[in-house]
Image (cartoon, rainbow, N blue to C red):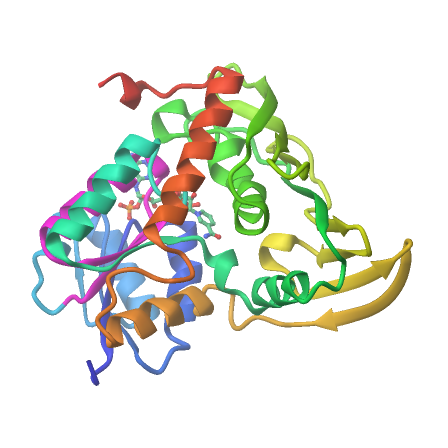
Amino acid sequence: MSRKINWGIIGLGKIAHKFAEDLLLHVDANLYAVASRSLAKAESFSKQFHSETFYGSYRTLTEDPKIDVVYIATPHVFHYENTMMCLEAGKAVLCEKAFGMNSKEVEKMIAKAEEKKVFLMEALWTRFIPATEKVLELLNSGLIGDLKTLRADFGFKADFDPEKRLFNKKLGGGSLLDIGIYPIFLSLLTLGIPKKMKASAVMSFTGVDKSVMMLFDYESNQTAILDSSLVVSTPGEAWFHGDKGSLKLYPKFHQAKQISFYKDQELKETYRINYKGNGYFHEIKEVIDCLKVGKTESEKMPHIFSLNLMHILDRVRAEIGLSYWEESE
Ligand SMILES: NC(=O)c1ccc[n+]([C@@H]2O[C@H](COP(=O)([O-])OP(=O)(O)OC[C@H]3O[C@@H](n4cnc5c(N)ncnc54)[C@H](OP(=O)(O)O)[C@@H]3O)[C@@H](O)[C@H]2O)c1
């Protein structure tokens, strides 16, 4: 495909605004259409980001023949339904994390993408930022020897509103699926699938987890100590400890701009690695690069990775006794 890629966005909330800013930075991206449940909201978003058209229904957007790829930015509980609708219409999909509510949903989304032979990827943008690429390179180079332990956290003090998606069970609320997914993602990327896990959560009266602590054990005696919180603000750093040194990914590992190398607690070197725009530029580039050569999945964020990630989230939820109403259906 030599022309620009026509993007559609559905669900015009907070992240959709940040994402649209980065879409405008890519020379091969054209923000073609946006859709909201409210036509007025779609029109206002369209004016702000100069999309060619706008719709007051998600389905109508997927029926537009000019759309190449749809970015889904609705709350997690709708990811399955929205993704299936786009794939059914033959549209490529970039869907926000958490990809679905459980691994059954993710399995069906992947099966549908394979059946329709269209591109599907989870919008786990941290995978694509240059600092993540650099930390993988440093770990593979043997700089810190054999990786033994990962410690990573993601916590912020969220405004409590039982109706809004962070604490609302009907909208897939809770810290685990919203931000706990980031440290788990990093553990899966660098250590693989845990052999054993322990997890403990503090629950909100709305029935979702306010915070979760997780301890993962791996076959080769490696460990990961991870946590997420919607109650307290935490450093958000990731520390990789090996038998020859440590690497710190910071200031917030999910949007890192620096990596420091320590030996015996002594700082040896700091690498400064910025990302472009709000950081979403890099996942946008990945999608465009894949679509241009006709790929139906990304090698950096393949379907199996998203499925394994969701399996781990399922296992943590089983440990903390958190299930969502959708799963009983
Ligand atoms: N990658 C990242 O850095 C990042 C950051 C934040 C969030 N996220 C992910 O992006 C998704 C959206 O998060 P957000 O913070 O943008 O949420 P948000 O501000 O609440 O926006 C979600 C949008 O979804 C649509 N929606 C459809 N049905 C809805 C319903 N019943 N209730 C509420 N909204 C509904 C609404 O758009 P319309 O009114 O236009 O239809 C709403 O504006 C989540 O899955 C989250 O995990 C990712």
As for residue 296 lying within the magenta part, the answer is no
Q: Can you say whether 66 is above or below 201 in the image?
A: below
**Rendered location of residue 321, percent (x, y):** 48, 15
Q: Residue at x 64, y 39 (%)?
A: 220
Of residue 298 and residue 65, the one placed in the foreground of this image is 298
Tell me which image quadrant ligand 1 sits in: top left
**Residue 266 visible:** yes
Quadrant location of the N terminus? bottom left
Asked whether, in this view, residue 20 is left or right of residue 52, the answer is: right
Considering only vertical position in the picture, is 68 above or below 96? below
Q: Is residue 146 left or right of residue 209?
A: right
172 vs 116: above or below:
above
Instruction: Name the residue rendered at 36%, 47% in the picture.
Output: 304
- Count of numbered labels shown in the rendering: 0
Q: Nearer the viewer, residue 164 or 213?
A: 213
Q: How far from the left and from the top, in percent, is residue 3?
A: 20, 83
Of 286 and 160, nearer the camera is: 286
> Residue at 19% across / 51% down in the picture?
113
The image quadrant of residue 196 is top right
Q: Can the viewer see residue 165 in this picture?
A: no
Query: In the image as oriented, which residue stretches furthest toward the front?
Result: 220
* Residue at x 35% of width, y 62% of height: 298
Quadrant where the C terminus is found in the figure: top left
In the visual, does 169 lie left or right of 85?
A: right
Residue 228's place in the image compared with 256, above or below, is: above
* Magenta highlight range: 67-96
Q: Quadrant of residue 29?
A: bottom left
- Judge whether residue 71 is colored magenta: yes
